[in-house]
């Protein structure tokens, strides 16, 4: 008798807590993806900044200054492209997360709405 009560209680607990567990998994996956995205972006921007500092340190005369200034346009183009790529990746992550949450909500409502 008592084992049946605990069995029913356990099954009801699992059923009622399942959406929370799925939500936590989605949040964890999203945080992990965002962290990877931010670390990769930070690495790329740091490398770009360091390369610019090294290039600026190599300026010794007018001709090297002119070469450095010429390089700045390509550097700005690379930086702009990196920022657009990062923005696109971030939008994609947000879109996927939104879809996953909507799917979870829909599934939970279907499961808990009496037919």
Image: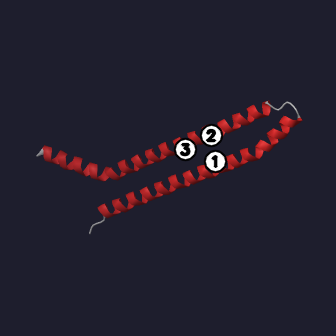
Colouring: secondary structure
- Pick the residue in front: 56 or 42: 56
Label 1 sits on residue: 82
Question: Of all residues shown, which one is farthest toward the bottom?
Answer: 115
Q: Name the quarter where the C terminus is drawn.
A: bottom left
Whichever of labels 2 and 3 marks the residue nearer the N terminus, that label is: 3
In this rendered view, identify the residue nearer to me: 91 or 85: 85
Relative to 42, residue 58 above or below: above
Q: CA distance from mark 1 to mark 3?
A: 12 Å
Element type at marker 2? Answer: helix
Contact (Cβ within 8 Å) of mark 1 with mark 2: yes
Of callouts 1 and 3, the N-terminal one:
3
Measured as percent of width and height from the top left, residue 42 is found at 61, 39
- Measure the alpha-carbon separation of dots 2 and 3: 11 Å
* Label 2 packing within 10 angstroms: few (<14), some (14-19), many (20+): some
Q: Residue furthest right?
A: 62
Res 45 label: none
Report the residue at 37% width, 50% height from top.
Answer: 22
Residue 44 image label: 2
Q: Which quadrant of the view contains residue 70?
A: top right
Is 95 left or right of 26, judged from the image as shown?
A: right
Rendered residue at 22%/48% (across/down): 9
Judged from the image, the secondary structure of the residue bearing numbered disc 3 is helix
Disc 1 element: helix
Label 3: few (<14), some or many (≥20) within 10 Å?
Answer: some
Question: What is the x, y in percent for residue 40?
Answer: 57, 40
State how many labels appear. 3
Q: Which mark is residue 37?
A: 3
């Amino acid at each position: 008798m008592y084992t049946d009560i605990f069995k029913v209680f356990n099954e009801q607990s699992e059923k009622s807590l399942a959406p929370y567990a799925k939500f936590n998994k989605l949040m964890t996956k999203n945080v992990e993806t965002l962290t990877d995205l931010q670390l990769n972006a930070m690495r790329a921007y740091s490398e770009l900044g360091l390369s610019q500092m090294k290039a600026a340190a190599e300026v010794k005369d007018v001709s090297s200054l002119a070469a450095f200034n010429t390089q700045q346009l390509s550097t700005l183009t690379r930086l702009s492209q990196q920022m657009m790529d990062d923005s696109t990746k971030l939008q994609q992550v947000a879109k996927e997360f939104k879809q996953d949450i909507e799917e979870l909500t829909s599934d939970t409502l279907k499961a808990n709405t009496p037919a």
